[in-house]
Amino acid sequence: MVGSMAKSDNKTRVRKKQEFVTSSDEQLKRAEQVVADSLKDNPELFNLPESRYTVESLVDFFVQSLEGSRKILPKEKRRYVIYLRKSTDDERKQVRSIEDQRKECLDLARRFDIKVRPEDIFEERWSAKTSGKREIFNAMMNGFEIGKYHGLISWSPDRLSRNMLEGGQIIEHVDHEKIQDLLFCTYAFDNTPNGKMMLGILFATSKQYSDKLAVDVARGITGAIHEGKYVGLVKKGYYADTDNGRFMPDGVHWQLLRQAVVMRLTEGKTNQEIADFLNTSNFSYRKNQDEPYRKSKMDKKTVATMFVDPFYTGAYKYGDNIANLNDNYNFLPLMTPDEYIALSKNMSDSFNKKFVGRSNVSQRLDFGLLREKVICDFCDGNMGFQRTRIVRGKNAGSWQLSYYCRNKECVRHNDDEAIRVYGKKLAKSVSARFITAHIEWTLRHMTANVLEAHKQYISRIEKQVAIDKDIAKRKLTEAKVELKRQKDMYAKYQTFQVDEPETYKKHHAGKLEFHQAQINAVNASITSAQKELDDLRKALPTREEFVELVHSYLKTILETSDLIEEDAVYRELVLNLRVRDNVVSVIKLNPPYDMMVDLSENTSWSG
């Protein structure tokens, strides 16, 4: 009976609600004093060091390590397509001709400063009432599936689909960020649950839609993370600007966290010692600049969690989506990629760096060398990457890398069939050393058509530099606009302090200091963006420098023990390759390297 009563009490136990304690003015002044004292001892304390790795390296690492992850690209880096369709079932009912649609879609692209390649304009004359009948539409959707395309422009939803199956496919691609931007000339799509529901209704009732909707062009957005905006999770050391939703460093509290990173990396302090330091320093946080500070209760677990959060480098993960905040705006990171790698056990393994952290609260990450580029020559399926540590023998401590065919219907998994057809059993996996040796052989034979390859390489680099310049110009323009806004706000509060000192002190104390700090931060962003733009104006590589670059690829894969660095070379060179029983049967290279290989020798090589 007593046991029953105890059980009943457990069921009715009310969970205690978390209480937020507002930081007092005295506590905030204490935090400021700690930072000021630290700066006296080391004026360079809060300057981030140079980093060998970039945030883009971290983003690529997560995309290749986490199944189903997607890189969210800024507008300048997305590849957009235009889809034009005119049905052939009833010419009299057509609302817009193909040429009309083309003109309006291109006008829309120009309005949003979107560049569309001529080969990315898809034109089709076929009804969309029945699914599966449009070859050009299917080819375009496959491009989104494999990550070739990122943004889609069409005149109206009914040009894309008049049936629920293909309409649902489009909405699912938007859901999974395979379509990262969806724009219409006659409809402002909003990437929200209600927006997607409305789009589904329009696909189903598209015959009535053209007459109802006013032509009101507005950009369809595909989630706040595309702009690097706050999406519901407070990040300590930053606040979300209420004007634009972006993460901004929160003064001395950002500096206290930066000091915590230095304590872990250079002073060898434990996570608990760092937590004690932050608590003693009255480290606080807030969601936006208009909210009061809340006292943060740090412990060794929260410190460890912070150290393995890639957000603090600018690699913003939310669900399966990963964005580089540095591409979106002038984000100020808390740590460099090199520092983050050293603080994360799983990542330091892949990057072959010394781990300086105390605990590991992140999930296991298996970086996939040549992920999705190795194809089984027996079943045409992608082979999975395997990475296991060798625990015995002279190679103990190193990694055994291989590729495994996951297709259980493949002849590799059917010994009887393999013996009948090939006279022997086939290995279910292939050692990575056979594959990397073939890539090495290929690099050694890159001696043909250097002149033409250099021209093609320069053409590709020019396009990439143009994109990077557009991003740098946008960030510089935004920073200058923000500087003017912060100066105007500072002048406003300065006047208010003089005219109504009591009201200012009671309701707006600290605003002048806040906006002065923002002015300083924006000035630093302008300097950084200008330097970035100046660096991009440097001369492109000569033919001799290009040849030296190709030679450096070979040197890198022969000497590096860093999987990330090695994989970067492979991804630059290799489009895909096919493997049989420890034999690379076919290797396809990316342009311009595909025209450089001397194929006078047999390229099917078993190592």
Image (tube, grey):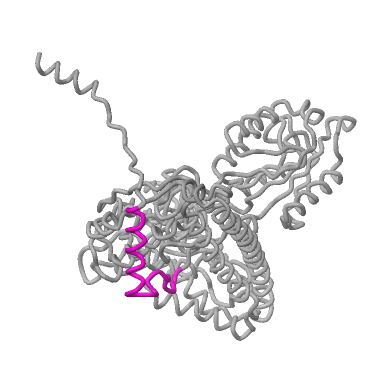
The answer to whether residue 311 is visible is yes
**In the figure, 2 relative to 48: above or below?**
above
Residue drawn at (39%, 74%) of the image: 44
Residue 119 belongs to the span the image colors magenta: no
The answer to whether residue 328 is visible is no
Given residues 239 and 198, the one toward you in this image is: 239
**Which residue is at the far right?**
92
Residue 30 belongs to the span the image colors magenta: yes
Image coords of residue 43 (percent x, y): 38, 75
Instruction: Judge from the rendering whether residue 195 lies leftward or rightward of residue 28; answer left or right.
Output: right
Image coords of residue 187 (percent x, y): 73, 37
Given residues 199 and 418, the one toward you in this image is: 199
Residue drawn at (65%, 68%) of the image: 469
Total numbered circles: 0
**Which residue is at the far left?**
2
Part of the protein shown in magenta: 26-53
Image coords of residue 34 (percent x, y): 32, 63
**In the figure, 164 relative to 387: above or below?**
above
Which quarter of the rendered picture does the N terminus lie within?
top left
Residue drawn at (59%, 84%) of the image: 545
Which quarter of the rendered picture does the C terminus lie within?
bottom left
Instruction: Judge from the rendering whether residue 211 lies leftward or rightward of residue 371; answer left or right.
Output: right
